[in-house]
Image (tube, rainbow, N blue to C red):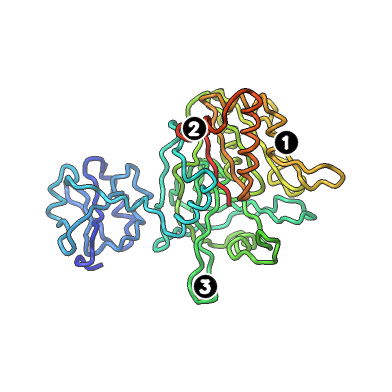
Amino acid sequence: MSTAELAKQHLIDPGICIRCNTCEETCPVKAITHDSRNYVVKAEVCNDCRACVPPCPTGAIDNWFPITPGKPYTLEEQYSWDELPAAAPIAAAVAEPADVARLTSEATAGQGGPVAAPWSAEKPAVNLYNERGPITATVSGNFRLTGEGASADIRHIVLDFGGVHFPLLEGQNIGIIPPGTDEQGRPHHVRLYSVASPRDGERPGYHNCALTVKRVTEDHEKKPVKGICSNYLCDLKKGDKVQVIGPFGANFLMPNHPGSSLMMICTGTGSAPMRAMTERRRRRIDLKEGGSLMLFFGARVQDELPYFGPLMKLPKDFIDINFAFSRVPGQPKRYVQDRIRERHEDVWRQLNDEHCYIYLCGLKGMEKGVDEAFRDICRQHGGDWDALLPQLREKGRYHIETY
């Protein structure tokens, strides 16, 4: 890139760089070099691919500074630094692509926008890979979760990133770039999918993650439609390659402090982040960190419920599971809000527990029914939902993502 075009410059922070040489070895265009003092970036060579960002063990590489076009910091200046210059860095590595920002806004509209993460949540890595420089993942598994006779085809898809570190936390999303172009010949838009595996991977210790994907065959009005990305993912075979960007999401994260509890409310593939959070806790069960798990899980029938079998094998004293089925022949329709009302005493106690965090994920519109259920429970116990809800949001205790 010509230095005359630069409005920001990629710099390495000498204050926290440990001189491990990872960035220089990783850079595909040889834009990084070093002397006996500092590692530096050649402004005229760097193409902003950011391949160097994920492998950096300290984050020293993750800095973009505003500059006067045509006047980047020289190598000599960078070699002389003990710390970065006194200028406000550009948060280039955390700026979401337009498609991702739009999808995030739509997903959190039910709560009026993103809510701050729990105070004890792990700091997430975000936007390490973008559309200009995606990471290639390999499919290591594609398993159908729903019964063969079920009308919904929901898949558990495992993606492997090889030897590349792709840090993910429970509640984060990744972007999938489906191949091909639309009717106008333009590349397909990015689709976001919640991660269904915990931070140490679907297979602990490996650079992989899992997704929960439903094959889309109709729109919200029940009209036939073929979802471009969902059908692409559901048809993948072991060994196929997938273009991935991200990670994304810095709010829908689980607490880390001992004694924290989770109330999880989901339908369908909204179970993905709940599965990740539950598996994180299950793998740490021997640590006896305390806190409870309560799950409200809705589907039309049992055969359309992802992860039903594994959920039933979890110890009853580990997680309190409440299913709601709305299309069982001969039985009344039951939704997650109905089950929440049935458990009003326990729900009321959790709403007032400062260490309980509430997560809702699933089909857009479900938040309205849940909201009314919480309002009824508060009224039943002498509380005020309209007064309590802002407090929950302010403390990062109430999170909604619906699609």
Which residue occupies the foreground of this view, 50 or 353? 353
What residue sits right under mark 2 in the picture?
255
Local crowd size for mark 1, using a 10 Å CA cut-off: few (<14), some (14–19), many (≥20): few
Residue 201 position (above or below residue 319): below
SS for callout 1: helix
Q: Are marks 3 and 2 in contact (CB under 8 Å)?
A: no
The residue depicted at 46 percent of the width and 47 percent of the height is 249
Which residue occupies the foreground of this view, 172 or 372? 372
Amino acid beneath label 3:
Thr
**375 left or right, relative to 148:** left
SS for callout 2: loop
What residue sits right under mark 1 in the picture?
312
Q: Please report whichever mark, 1 or 2, sits nearer to the chain's N-terminal start.
A: 2
**211 left or right, relative to 5:** right
What residue sits right under mark 3 in the picture?
181
Which residue occupies the foreground of this view, 83 or 139? 83
The residue depicted at 24 percent of the width and 57 percent of the height is 8
Q: CA distance from mark 1 to mark 3?
A: 42 Å
The residue depicted at 20 percent of the width and 65 percent of the height is 3
Q: Please report whichever mark, 3 or 2, sits nearer to the chain's N-terminal start.
A: 3
Callout in the foreground (1, 2): 2
**Where on the picture, by quarter, is residue 25?**
bottom left
Q: Please report whichever mark, 1 or 3, sits nearer to the chain's N-terminal start.
A: 3
Q: Quadrant of the N terminus?
A: bottom left
Local crowd size for mark 3, using a 10 Å CA cut-off: few (<14), some (14–19), many (≥20): few
**17 left or right, relative to 382:** left
Q: Please, which residue is most extreme toward the bottom here? A: 184
Amino acid beneath label 1:
Met
Q: CA distance from mark 3 to mark 2?
A: 40 Å
